[in-house]
Image (spheres, coloured by chain):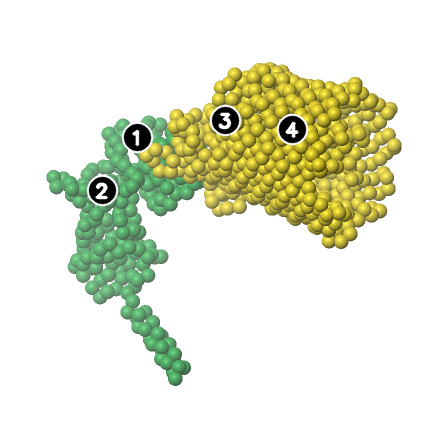
């Protein structure tokens, strides 16, 4: 692949049982990007990597949380919402193999990442800021979940895996399987997983009510070679969750369903200039329903139904070009239409039912062109420069939706915006050991449809009902980052600092004279642009491997943000340090990990409704071994998460609900 | 044979059609509900309404007039007087006197019925035209929601406030029209244009209101027009604070809405 050497490959085993990351040996890259590779097939991997064969069994939540700079907003034990360096929601893009997918829930219960399982995935690419890995204009970067595709193979063969996992806390059970058929012209892969968990116990043994969940996920992917260099690929994923508790929110979820389908045509001439050209069409639909019928009466002053849907249809066409050794160009044209509908019906005792559109049939149309060039200046210096232009149209597609908002906003609801992103990343190899890198980006985004058209959406963090604002200006930022890496055989240290300067930062401002819709809410806010905000921080990673069997890794992150009025920005994690010592010996592996976070006192209760958070530290242990069994490999893993049963939460956890206490995790996987 | 038959049918249809047109009374095009008809001294008065059921509150009432030759009378003065007969006493209620509406081909007026028909009281409408008066007994039903009310002011006067239809509400911004009359005597309810009004909306079952309403302002003839913003369907209550010269006359004149 042309861009192979601009990604850092990190093989994640388990967030809480972190075995040291295995960095790719071609370690010569800018760090604006990280790729987490989900491990499927032991045969393709070297012996070192084979030891991490349980990693398929982690949840997407844990997989994302283990990435430096990524923190999760947690509303329960399911569907955590990822943030990158404190940026979240509309500030980061989430795509699945380049497909735009938007959750349907007005309370952010279903980020797009909740409809994907590691079993579906080849890898996750995380980008920090504008760059050519984002399929859209973005300020904070994003996640691209790359779906696992079956491989064509000269000799016909069948391969697969099956696994079962159990966790004592929450009595969680999962089973998963995958089967792949490969031949010279045709390959197909199917995969499925089922997960079910009860309520978990927090540290100290107290049960967390309404933290249960159940889901299944299935994927089907096929590739067919039409002719030399010509391929057709189809992907389909269906993900259905049900009976999902959200202890931090007022409601649970009766179901959350996604259907994600795509078909693409791939041309790989490997020619002198055109390297590959892929064109994809896709459609996805998400159907989500909140539910309060299982809550005790005291928690439900008024019973309500809150369903929502999200439909997205789109395409992209992406080509990779090479012009000599100096220019590697990627061009991409992509577009999509997303339609959101969300409604609420309340059933008060002894009065008529009440109906409203909470997202009044909002539509976003985007078409964008992205061109980037990786330029080798000298053997030691390289830059990646790119520009992206988007048209983003926002509108209401139904008469009922327009009528709903007629009493809230004057004039035309439609907004048409042009977005311009540009970025330049440079790196310079000073010596064999030293690498310096830096990046500058100009980024912008449109307000999300929720920020523009939301109708009394309740935010549990500050307890306010939020009203959208179709007049919002684009949020823009200048992103700067710079870092250095020192690398030798047994020791690697990588440190970088970043700063983002925002204009028209989007945040809620209290609206006087508006009465709240949600019973017990603190007031009503409307999204507005704040003139300026800044976000800055640093990340440092140290990896030591004094002996071939011993690996020590320390990953440390810090972020701080404030707005023009000197209020601390919300949802910013405090200093956090994850440290792991692991030993691999023959077929065995052991690891001990500790995760520490400092207290977060830099919060704005007044503006953003956040309260300070306490520091915490937990320790995790794990052990595993694998057995070759004829053509197959059987792998056992057992671990204890939070071994001291500490009662703790992270700053981004809504309502500061405690996380699970001690948890014994067992995984068995067989691959053939 | 077939062709002749078809021709015959076609001819029959044409003739029938012509015949109908010739005989059809002029009022056949009236798109209203016919309530009653009565004749007095050569004038036939037919009473029409928008709906068959007349709820307590503001009701549009229409009449058509014909002389004894069957010709429509368009250029006369028609007067409505509503009478509530409670046995021991009688009183009237606010009225908007009719005027001829060329589009409808009807005299169009309105009555605010201030209470429903009950065991203790019955309504009648006296229509006077061409020096002839006919009296129509009417049954006024209890509306599902309170569309009008009589409120005692701090100036000792009684005021009748009524929502003016059409009451076709939807979520979002709606036009609002109310009529206010002062009770000068039990038989005289002149329109009152002298108020400044504050509108406050409320959902009684939820305890919240809605933003961005426009206070009704006088549009003449007792009408006040404003805007009401409903954030959802359901039960709503509109509170009107009626003021004159910065003095609160009626603190809370309210009507109820359900949609």
Q: Position of residue A9 (x, y in %)?
A: 74, 31
Image depth: mark 2 or mark 4 in front: 4
Instruction: Please tell me which residue is depicted at 54% across the width and 36% down the height of the picture.
Output: A215
Colour assigned to chain A in the rendering is yellow
Image depth: mark 3 or mark 2 in front: 3
Which residue is identified by label 3?
Answer: A199
Question: Which is more toward the observer, A285 or A424?
Answer: A285
Mark 2 chain: B
Instruction: Please tell me which residue is depicted at 77% across the width and 20% down the height of the picture.
Output: A545
Instruction: Identify the chain drawn in green.
Output: B
Disc sitting over residue B116 in the figure: 2
Q: Left of A50 or right of it: where is A256?
A: left
Assess whether mark 2 and mark 1 are in contact (beta carbons under 8 angstroms): no
Assess whether mark 1 and mark 4 are in contact (beta carbons under 8 angstroms): no
Disc sitting over residue A636 in the figure: 4
Q: Mark 2 vs mark 4: same chain?
A: no
Mark 3 chain: A
Disc sitting over residue B195 in the figure: none
Q: Is residue B60 above or below residue A472?
A: below
Q: Earlier in the sequence, mark 1 or mark 2?
A: 2
Secondary structure, mark 2, is loop
Q: Left of A7 or right of it: where is A431?
A: right
Instruction: Please tell me which residue is depicted at 54% across the width and 24% down the height of the picture.
Output: A169
Tell me the CA gap for discs 4 and 1. 80 Å
Which residue is identified by label 1?
Answer: B250
Image depth: mark 3 or mark 1 in front: 3
């Amino acid at each position: 692949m042309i861009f192979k050497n601009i990604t850092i490959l990190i093989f994640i085993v388990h967030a809480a049982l972190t075995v040291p990351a295995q960095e790719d040996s071609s370690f010569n890259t800018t760090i604006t990007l990280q790729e987490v590779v989900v491990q499927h097939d032991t045969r393709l991997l070297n012996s070192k990597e084979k030891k991490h064969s349980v990693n398929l069994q982690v949840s997407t939540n844990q997989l994302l949380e283990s990435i430096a700079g990524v923190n999760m907003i947690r509303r329960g034990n399911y569907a955590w919402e990822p943030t990158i360096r404190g940026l979240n929601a509309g500030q980061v893009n989430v795509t699945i193999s380049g497909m735009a997918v938007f959750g349907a829930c007005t309370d952010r219960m279903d980020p797009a990442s909740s409809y994907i399982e590691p079993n579906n995935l080849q890898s996750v690419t995380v980008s920090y800021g504008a760059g050519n890995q984002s399929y859209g204009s973005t300020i904070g970067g994003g996640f691209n979940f790359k779906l696992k595709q079956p491989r064509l193979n000269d000799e016909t063969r069948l391969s697969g895996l099956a696994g079962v996992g159990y966790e004592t806390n929450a009595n969680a059970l999962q089973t998963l399987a995958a089967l792949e058929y490969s031949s010279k012209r045709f390959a197909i892969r199917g995969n499925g997983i089922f997960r079910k968990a009860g309520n978990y116990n927090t540290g100290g043994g107290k049960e967390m009510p309404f933290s249960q969940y159940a889901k299944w996920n299935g994927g089907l992917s096929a590739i067919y070679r039409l002719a030399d260099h010509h391929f057709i690929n189809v992907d389909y994923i269906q993900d259905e969750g049900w009976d999902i508790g959200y202890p931090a929110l007022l409601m649970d979820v009766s179901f959350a369903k996604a259907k994600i389908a795509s078909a693409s045509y791939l041309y790989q001439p490997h020619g002198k200039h055109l390297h590959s050209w892929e064109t994809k069409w896709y459609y996805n639909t998400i159907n989500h329903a909140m539910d309060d019928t299982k809550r005790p009466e005291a928690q439900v002053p008024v019973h309500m139904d809150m369903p929502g849907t999200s439909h997205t249809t789109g395409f992209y066409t992406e080509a990779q070009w090479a012009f000599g050794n100096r220019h590697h160009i990627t061009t991409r044209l992509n577009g999509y239409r997303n339609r959101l509908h969300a409604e609420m019906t309340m059933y008060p005792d002894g009065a008529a039912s009440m109906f409203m559109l909470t997202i009044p049939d909002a539509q976003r149309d985007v078409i964008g062109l992205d061109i980037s060039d990786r330029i080798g200046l000298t053997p030691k210096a390289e830059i990646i420069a790119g520009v992206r232009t988007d048209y983003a149209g926002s509108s209401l597609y139904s008469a009922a939706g327009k009528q709903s908002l007629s009493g809230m906003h004057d004039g035309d609801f439609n907004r048409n915006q042009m977005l311009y992103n540009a970025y330049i990343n440079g790196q310079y190899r000073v010596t064999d050991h030293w690498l310096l890198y830096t990046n500058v980006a100009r980024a912008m985004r449109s307000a999300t449809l929720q920020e523009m058209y939301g109708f009394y959406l309740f935010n549990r963090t500050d307890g306010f009902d939020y009203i959208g604002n179709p007049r919002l200006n684009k949020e823009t930022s200048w992103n700067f980052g710079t870092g250095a890496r020192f690398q030798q055989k047994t020791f690697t240290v990588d440190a970088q600092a970043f700063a983002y300067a925002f204009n028209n930062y989007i945040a809620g401002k209290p609206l006087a004279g508006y009465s709240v819709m949600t019973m017990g809410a603190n007031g009503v806010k409307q999204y507005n642009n704040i003139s300026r905000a800044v976000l800055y921080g640093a990340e440092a990673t140290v990896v030591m491997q004094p002996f071939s069997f011993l690996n020590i890794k320390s990953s440390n992150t810090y972020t701080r943000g404030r707005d023009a009025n000197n209020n601390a920005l919300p949802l910013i994690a405090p200093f956090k340090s994850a440290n792991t010592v692991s030993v691999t010996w023959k077929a065995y592996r052991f690891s001990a990990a500790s995760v520490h976070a400092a207290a977060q006192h830099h919060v704005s209760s007044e503006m953003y409704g956040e309260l300070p958070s306490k520091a915490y530290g937990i320790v995790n242990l794990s052990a595993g071994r694998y057995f070759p069994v004829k053509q197959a490999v059987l792998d056992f893993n057992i671990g204890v998460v939070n071994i001291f049963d500490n009662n703790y939460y992270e700053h981004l956890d809504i309502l500061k609900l405690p996380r699970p206490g001690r948890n014994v995790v067992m995984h068995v996987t067989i691959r053939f | 044979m077939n062709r002749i038959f078809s021709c015959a049918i076609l001819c029959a249809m044409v003739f029938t059609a012509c015949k109908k047109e010739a005989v059809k009374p002029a009022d056949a095009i009236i798109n209203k509900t016919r309530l009653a008809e009565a004749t007095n001294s050569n004038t036939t008065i037919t009473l029409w309404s928008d709906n068959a059921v007349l709820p307590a509150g503001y009701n549009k009432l229409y009449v058509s007039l014909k002389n004894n030759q069957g010709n429509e009378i368009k250029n006369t003065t028609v007067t409505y007087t509503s009478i509530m007969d409670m046995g021991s006493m009688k009183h009237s209620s606010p009225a908007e006197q009719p005027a001829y509406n060329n589009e409808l081909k009807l005299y169009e007026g309105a009555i605010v019925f201030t209470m429903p028909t009950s065991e203790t009281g019955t309504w009648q409408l006296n229509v006077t035209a061409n020096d002839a008066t006919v009296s129509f007994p009417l049954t006024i039903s209890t509306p599902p929601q309170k569309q009008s009310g009589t409120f005692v002011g701090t100036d000792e006067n009684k005021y009748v406030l009524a929502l003016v239809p059409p009451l076709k509400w939807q979520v979002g911004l709606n036009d609002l029209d109310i009529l206010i009359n002062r009770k000068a005597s039990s038989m005289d309810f002149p329109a009152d244009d002298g108020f400044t009004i504050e509108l406050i909306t409320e959902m009684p079952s939820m305890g919240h209101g809605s933003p961005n309403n426009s206070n009704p302002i006088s549009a003449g003839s007792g009408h006040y027009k404003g805007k009401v913003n409903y954030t959802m369907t359901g039960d709503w209550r509109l509170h009107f604070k009626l003021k004159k010269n910065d003095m609160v006359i009626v603190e809370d004149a309210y009507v109820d809405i359900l949609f």
